[in-house]
Image (cartoon, rainbow, N blue to C red):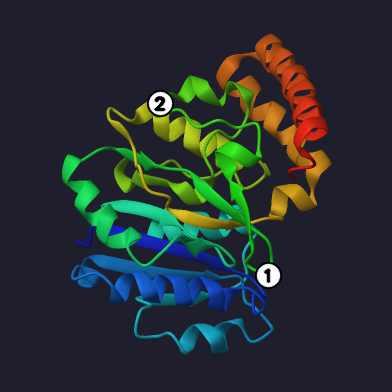
C-alpha cells in the first residue's frame, strides 16, 4: 500500500493542467520514495486536450479515469474510492505542489502517524505570480493547534493544504458547493492526532468553483455551519464573517 495518494480532478483543464503535472513531477523526481506515491487523475470526460496533456506525463501517473460525472465533488468521491494510499491529498488542475522538496519532507512527517496534516498555502494568479500566503492575504489566520471548532468562521485551511488518512475520510456532499468545508470539519472530528507542518504544501490558484458561484457558495456554507454548530451560531458567525471581510478588504484590498 502506498503512503500517499495524490488526486487531481480535471474537466476541460488544458489551460491549467500542465502546471500541476510539472510540479508533481518535480516533487516525485526529488524523492527516493516515489514508488510509495500513487497519482490519480479523475477526469469528467474532457473534450479539449486535457487527456493528451496528461498522457505526456504517464511516467508519474498511476491511473487516469475519464468519464462523465456530476461535478467536482462527485469526481473527488471517485478519487477517494480509487485511492489505495494511507493518506489522500487533493491537488486539482491549476494548483501546484509548493516546491520540489515538499513530498520528501512530507514522507518524513508521516513517521508521526497523525490523522491529519495541514499547512499554509501560497495564493497565486493565473500568470503564476505570488499574491501571498493565505493566512496573511485573507482573514483566515492559521492556528498551529487546529480544531474543528476553528471552522466556525469558515474555511480555516485551504483544501490543497490538508492531507488526511483515507480511513477517516467521509464522502463529499455533491449537492453543496461548500462541501470541502464540511469534509474537513468531519475529518477533524474523527482525527485523534492533527499535525501542523512548518513548510508550505501548495500553490493555490485563485478563482475556484466557489468563487465563480459566490452567492450559492455562501448559502451552502451557512448550511454546513448550521449542521456542525447549530442555526443561531451559524447565522451569528455569518454576520461576523461578512463584517470581518468588509473590514479586511477595506484595509488590505479585495481577497476573492
Q: Residue at horizontal 16%, vertical 46%?
A: 111
Q: Which image quadrant is residue 13 in? A: bottom right
| Mark 1 and mark 2: Cα distance apart in space | 37 Å
In the depicted structure, whether residue 114 falls above or below residue 20:
above
Left or right: residue 216 versus residue 194 is: right
* Location of residue 120 in the rendering, given as x and y in whole percent from the top left corner: 48, 43
The residue at the point 41 percent across, 35 percent down is: 187
Q: Is residue 29 above or below residue 225?
A: below
Q: Position of residue 256 (x, y in %)?
A: 75, 45
Identify the residue under disc 2: 189
Q: Quadrant of residue 113?
A: top left
The answer to which of 43 and 181 lies nearer the viewer is 181
Q: Position of residue 239 (x, y in %)?
A: 77, 18
Q: Nearer the viewer, residue 227 or 200?
A: 200
User: Crowding near pointer 1: few (<14 within 10 Å), some, many (20+)?
Assistant: few
Q: Can you say whether 225 is above or below 194 in the image?
A: above
Amino acid at each position: 500500500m502506498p503512503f500517499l495518494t495524490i488526486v487531481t480532478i480535471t474537466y476541460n483543464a488544458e489551460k491549467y493542467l500542465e502546471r500541476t503535472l510539472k510540479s508533481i513531477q518535480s516533487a516525485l523526481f526529488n524523492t527516493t520514495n516515489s514508488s510509495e506515491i500513487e497519482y490519480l487523475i479523475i477526469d469528467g470526460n474532457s473534450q479539449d486536450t486535457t487527456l493528451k496533456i496528461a498522457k505526456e506525463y504517464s511516467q508519474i501517473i498511476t491511473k487516469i479515469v475519464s468519464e462523465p460525472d456530476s461535478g467536482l465533488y462527485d469526481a473527488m468521491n471517485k478519487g477517494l474510492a480509487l485511492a489505495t494510499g494511507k493518506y489522500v491529498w487533493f491537488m486539482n488542475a491549476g494548483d501546484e505542489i509548493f516546491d520540489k522538496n515538499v513530498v520528501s519532507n512530507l514522507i518524513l512527517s508521516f513517521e508521526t502517524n497523525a490523522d491529519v496534516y495541514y499547512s499554509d498555502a501560497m495564493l497565486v494568479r493565473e500568470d503564476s505570480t505570488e499574491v501571498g500566503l493565505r493566512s496573511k492575504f485573507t482573514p483566515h489566520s492559521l492556528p498551529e493547534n487546529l480544531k474543528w471548532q476553528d471552522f466556525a468562521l469558515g474555511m480555516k485551511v485551504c483544501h490543497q493544504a490538508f492531507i488526511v488518512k483515507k480511513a477517516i475520510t467521509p464522502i463529499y456532499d455533491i449537492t453543496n458547493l461548500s462541501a470541502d468545508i464540511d469534509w474537513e470539519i468531519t475529518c477533524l472530528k474523527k482525527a485523534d492526532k492533527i499535525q501542523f507542518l512548518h513548510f508550505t504544501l501548495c500553490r493555490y490558484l485563485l478563482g475556484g468553483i466557489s468563487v465563480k458561484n459566490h452567492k450559492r457558495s455562501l448559502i451552502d456554507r451557512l448550511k454546513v455551519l448550521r449542521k456542525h454548530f447549530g442555526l443561531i451560531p451559524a447565522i451569528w458567525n455569518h454576520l461576523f464573517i461578512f463584517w470581518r471581510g468588509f473590514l479586511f478588504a477595506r484595509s488590505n484590498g479585495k481577497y476573492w
